[in-house]
Image (tube, rainbow, N blue to C red):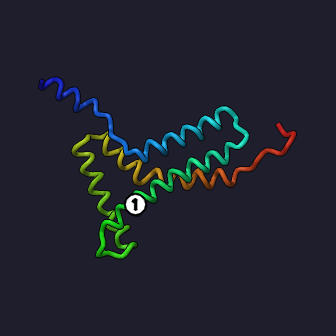
Amino acid sequence: MVGLRTVRHFLYYPDFLASVLIAGFFGLVACAAMVFHFKYWRATVVMASSVYLLLYAIRVIRMTTMTTDLSFLSAVSFYYSASWHVAIGMFQEKSMAGGLAHAFLEYVMPALIVALIAVTLISRRPKPGAV
C-alpha cells in the first residue's frame, strides 16, 4: 500500500478545469488549421485565442465578484495577490508539475494569447499569385 501511494505521488497528473479543456480544444483546432494550410487560419487562430480570453475573463470575474465588500479593481488586485499564495500551495501540495501548471495557466498564458492575437492580426496575407 505504501508503494502504491508513493507511485501515485510521483505520477501526478494535474486536474484541469473544463474551461481549460475547452480552450485547449479550440487551440488544437487552430493548430490543425495552420498545419493543414486552411485558407482562413488567421481567423481560426483569433477565434481560438478569443475563446481562451473569454473563458479566462469569466473565471476572473466570477472569482472577483465573490467578494461583495470590495470594488471591482480592488477585488481583481486581491485575486492576483491571493493567486501567488495558491501557486505556493500548489508547489507544496502537488509538487513541481502542479505549481508550474498553475503559474503558467494563471500568469503566462493570458499574456501569450494577447501577443498571439496581435501577431496574427499584424501578419500579412500573401498577395495572390505570390509563392
Image location of residue 15, percent across then percent down: 33, 40
Q: Is residue 99 left or right of residue 35?
A: left
Say which residue appears at 33% left-offset and 38% top-offset.
14
Residue at 43% x, 45% y: name it: 20
Left or right, 7 with reference to 119: left
Q: In which quarter of the image is the N terminus?
A: top left
The residue that mark 1 highlights is: 60
Q: State the image coordinates of residue 120 (x, y, percent, origin top left).
A: 65, 50
Residue ranking furthest to the left = 2
Q: In which quarter of the image is the C terminus?
A: top right
User: In the rendered image of this protein, does residue 5 appear above or below residue 84?
Assistant: above
Q: Position of residue 122 (x, y in %)?
A: 69, 54
Q: What residue type is labelled 1?
A: Val
Is 14 situated left or right of 43 in this image?
A: left
Task: List x then y, in percent, for residue 25.
Answer: 51, 39
| Residue at screen point 25% across, 31% down | 10
Which residue: 45% across, 51% down?
108
Residue toward you, 93 or 37: 37
Count of labels shown?
1
Element class at badge 1 = helix
Task: Residue 39: name its quadrant.
Answer: top right
Q: Which residue occupies the foreground of this view, 129 or 24?
A: 24
Seen as rendered, the residue at the extreme right is 129
Above or below, comparing residue 72 to residue 58 in the picture:
below
- Mark 1 surroundings within 10 Å by alpha-carbon count, few (fewer than 14), some (14 through 19), many (20 or more): some
